[in-house]
Image (spheres, grey):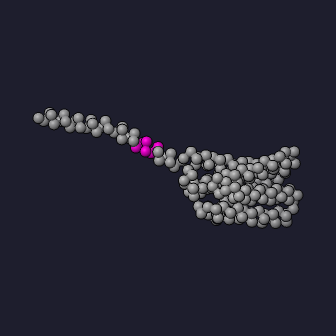
Amino acid sequence: MKNKWILSLLLAIALVFSMLPAVGSVQAKEGAQKDSACLSPKMVQLQGDMRKAWIDHTIWTRSYIVSAISNLPDQKDVLNRLLQNQQEIGNLIKPYYGEEAGNKLADLLREHILIAVKIVAAAKAGNQADVKKLEEEWHRNADDIAKFLSAANPNWSFKTLQDMLYTHLQYITEIVLACLKGDWKADIAATDKNEIHMIHLADILTEGIVKQFPQKF
């Protein structure tokens, strides 16, 4: 009788252990489904597109600065590509905020670039009075961009965006000054910081869109 009881107990234990892989499999599947829900293909696509657009912004801005200061023959073509990038950024928000809003953002960003072009020219000529005046205009434009975006999405804080944009302007200024001095290590360091910073900005924009329009993701 005792042997039968022990045998029954062993069979019960064996049955429990035989079920463990199945339970683990179900839990793993549920975990994968949750991960998939957190990182939907559409969200990953938007994040990648947004990051590329802002990385391009840093790359072509730096390329223009080098071309303008060095009087390279590609200066006009690089500027055209940089201005095109601003429309590409504007186009990214059109599926969520509409054609007019996307074009408005592109216009504000083009103004940001065209002011930078004037700053580079004034700095190269050693005209500090114009540089100072243009920098004030540059920061006013950054405020306009922050106001526009924060009004469109409650997840985008005006202060956060303003701080992000002001830091971006500081990094561009560092690049311009480094290139004028021929301090290429400082130029490279500022360019690296600017790129990482703008990837962060891109992620802030992506996260805000996903929170505001969860049904689209």
Determine which quarter of the picture holds residue 157.
Answer: bottom right
Q: Nearer the viewer, residue 120 or 115?
A: 115
* Residue depicted at x 14% and y 33%: 3
Q: Residue at x 30, y 37 (%)?
A: 17
- Magenta residues, start to end: 27-32
Residue 40 visible in image: yes
Specify whether residue 29 is painted magenta.
yes
Query: Is the N terminus in the top left, top right, bottom left or bottom right quadrant?
Result: top left
Asked whether, in this view, residue 27 is left or right of residue 166, the answer is left
From this viewpoint, is residue 173 visible? Answer: no
Residue 140 place in picture, x, y as percent? 74, 66
What residue sits 77% from the left and 62% below the top? 138
Q: x, y percentage for residue 13?
A: 25, 38
Compared with residue 203, is residue 149 higher up or lower down, i.e. above or below?
A: below
Give the x, y percent position of residue 113.
78, 56
Q: Is residue 154 magenta?
A: no
